[in-house]
Image (cartoon, grey):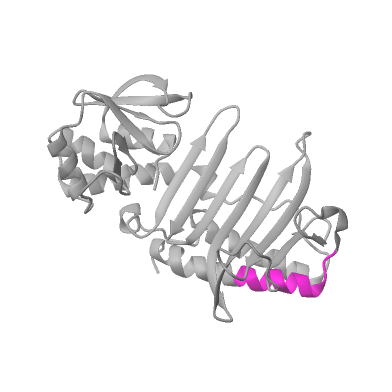
Amino acid sequence: MGITIREFQVAMETYGAERLSNCSGSRYNVSVPCFNVAGTKFFHSGSYYIVHREKDVPEEIMSRAMAEFGEKHPGGDNFWWGEVHSIKGMLTLVAMLDGKYNKELVDELTNETYKKLLDCASIQSNVEFPFHSMHSPKMEKLYKLLAEYSNIVNPFGNSEHQIKDPIQYLDAVEVTLAMQEGRKPYTRLNLSMGSCQAKFEDDENSWFYDTFVLIQRNRNNGYINMGHYYLKGNDGRSVDEVVRLDYNAIEGSYDEHPDDIDLRISLKTGLAWQTYKEEQAELATDEQIEVMITHLKISIKKIKNKIVRKMVSI
């Protein structure tokens, strides 16, 4: 688990904590937001967790906060020594410090925090695909499937989805959102449940949709890592749009297996190649496109069943 700078700031503002001047992160020398609660200073590490300094958190309160999550010692999912690693853990801790804690309040604050975070145009509208592939009927089929894939990777961008309140799925699905506005804006959304992951990123130079799912074939446990990405050149013009497949037949194996698949297909040119071998690219065959379609369908089904169904009202 972890907390982005954006998540930390919105959560503390939602709680109503006293805002202090920005300071340097404890781990990386970046400017991060700081807040005061009952004399304890909370600020972002600059990486993925929150630190608390100056006035120590009483041991009794820390033990109570950990007990709410079934943790007996620091080092779990929510609390480390002098650190907080989850939004709900942080809201629990600050509410206890203020003498305001009850479970319903923390649930309400957590729900409101994520509703604010997810209520943004960069999440709620999917990006446009720059190249409408017309190289062959098979490529047209692949292109249409990628539209479905994007709606699964980022379910918030699908207007047909009725997303539940965050508090209804946050215990099942881990949601991480990082954002920056201004001169170099970006949006990064990560949804995960166990070993199943879906990622969406969008910035001024590119965007990508990415998934990781486990799969079993021939009594071997493997994985499918798929991606659909778009790149701009230095002049801001479209360079390429690619769909990527990495299939590893045996999870955890560093040896190449005959069933492993490493395939890239350009929707702009219709060419196919292996990683680092783009100079050997050739026109994608129907067989290669069908392999890509097959693994896309598997990935869509896995993410839908493991993640999206927990988030969407059916």
Start and end of the magenta stretch?
A: 283-297
Q: Nearer the viewer, residue 260 or 137?
A: 260
Question: Residue 304's x, y, as percent?
Answer: 49, 67
Residue 274 seen in the current view: yes
Q: Nearer the viewer, residue 120 or 248?
A: 248
Q: Main secondary structure of the magenta part?
A: helix
Identity of the residue drawn at 40% across and 39% down:
7
Would you place residue 196 above or below residue 59 in this image? below
Question: Residue 112's x, y, as percent?
Answer: 31, 44
Would you place residue 140 above or below residue 158 in this image? below
Q: Nearer the viewer, residue 255 or 290?
A: 255
Outermost residue on the front side: it is: 255
Identity of the residue drawn at 79% across and 34% down:
235
The picture quadrant where one finds residue 21 is: top left
Identity of the residue drawn at 73% across and 74% down:
290
The picture quadrant where one finds residue 217 is: bottom right
Is 309 colored magenta in this rendering?
no
Identity of the residue drawn at 30% across and 45% down:
75
Give the quadrant of the C terminus: bottom left
Task: Tell whether 89 sits left or right of 303.
Answer: left
